[in-house]
Amino acid sequence: MQNKEQNTEEKIITAAKEIFIEKGLQGARMQEIADQAKINKALLHYYFRSKEKLFDAVFEASINDLFPKLSSKIDPSKSLDEVMAGIVSFYNKFLIENPFIPQFIFHEIWQHPEKLARFIREQNNFISNINELTKPIELGEIKTEYKSQHFIANILGMCIFPYLSRPIFQRLFFENQEDDYDQFLSERTEVILNVFNQLSKPEKK
């Protein structure tokens, strides 16, 4: 019985993920998700009382997949250049495959910031590893007048913004052509790493 319930819940989360990717949180309807999962709406509400509860469940499942993989890319024994190349390459590929993640993250940032912060802190010394990696900035070995927090914000912004702003950016600059925008996203890894390499050049004496 427990396995059956677990399978049903997993089926619902998979279906909801597909609908949220296609229509976003606001555009998704519970009936559509039930249809996608091939169950009736009453059963869907038995497992998840509201669309917001289901959204949270999909987010948690996705973020549980993201952070262990992302943490594995953060190896303080490697150079900052090497680690950044691994992080940006992985992160951009992950977002291409999971384009709804930025929307989920921003939803959680505003709705449940403590919950999200606590989850991130629990991810295998994720924050301490990040701090270790950015030590060259604090020590003045990286060519920048800014604090390490600005460096992290810049990298995350360059990674996330094109996905978060896709609905408007695609219409304004790509004539709403999905294939052209997908190509643009696939180029982001190289562009971001080139920007990072410029920022991380050692200060000339």
Image (cartoon, rainbow, N blue to C red):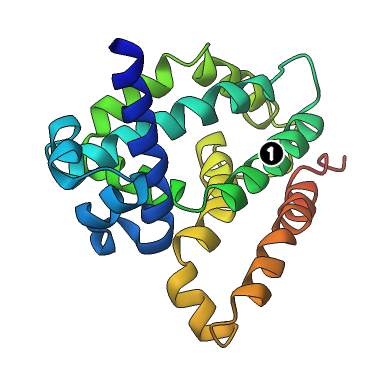
Rendering coords of residue 47 (x, y %): 19, 30
Rendering coords of residue 96 (x, y %): 61, 52
What residue occupies the far bottom of the structure in this picture? Answer: 175
Q: Residue at x 24, y 61 (%)?
A: 26
- Above/below status of 78 relative to 192: above
**Quick one: 75 or 31, which is closer to the camera?**
31
**Quick one: 107 or 143, which is closer to the camera?**
107
Q: Residue at x 56, y 88 (%)?
A: 175
**Quick one: 194 or 92, which is closer to the camera?**
92
Find numbered disc 1 in the image and state the secondary structure of the residue it sits on.
helix
Q: Residue at x 53, y 19 (%)?
A: 126
> How many numbered circles are shown?
1
Rendered-image quadrant of the N terminus: top left
Other-residue count near label 1 (Cα within 10 Å), few / some / many at <14 / 14–19 / ≥20: some
Quadrant housing residue 186:
bottom right
- Above/below status of 128 relative to 42: above
Rendering coords of residue 74 (x, y %): 67, 23
What residue occupies the far right of the structure in this picture? Answer: 205
**Quick one: 128 or 11, which is closer to the camera?**
11
**Amino acid at dot 1:** Phe
Q: Is residue 42 left or right of residue 31?
A: left
Rendered-image quadrant of the C terminus: top right
Q: Which residue is tagged 1?
A: 90
Rendering coords of residue 5 (x, y %): 29, 20
Q: Residue at x 32, y 29 (%)?
A: 8
- Above/below status of 158 relative to 90: below
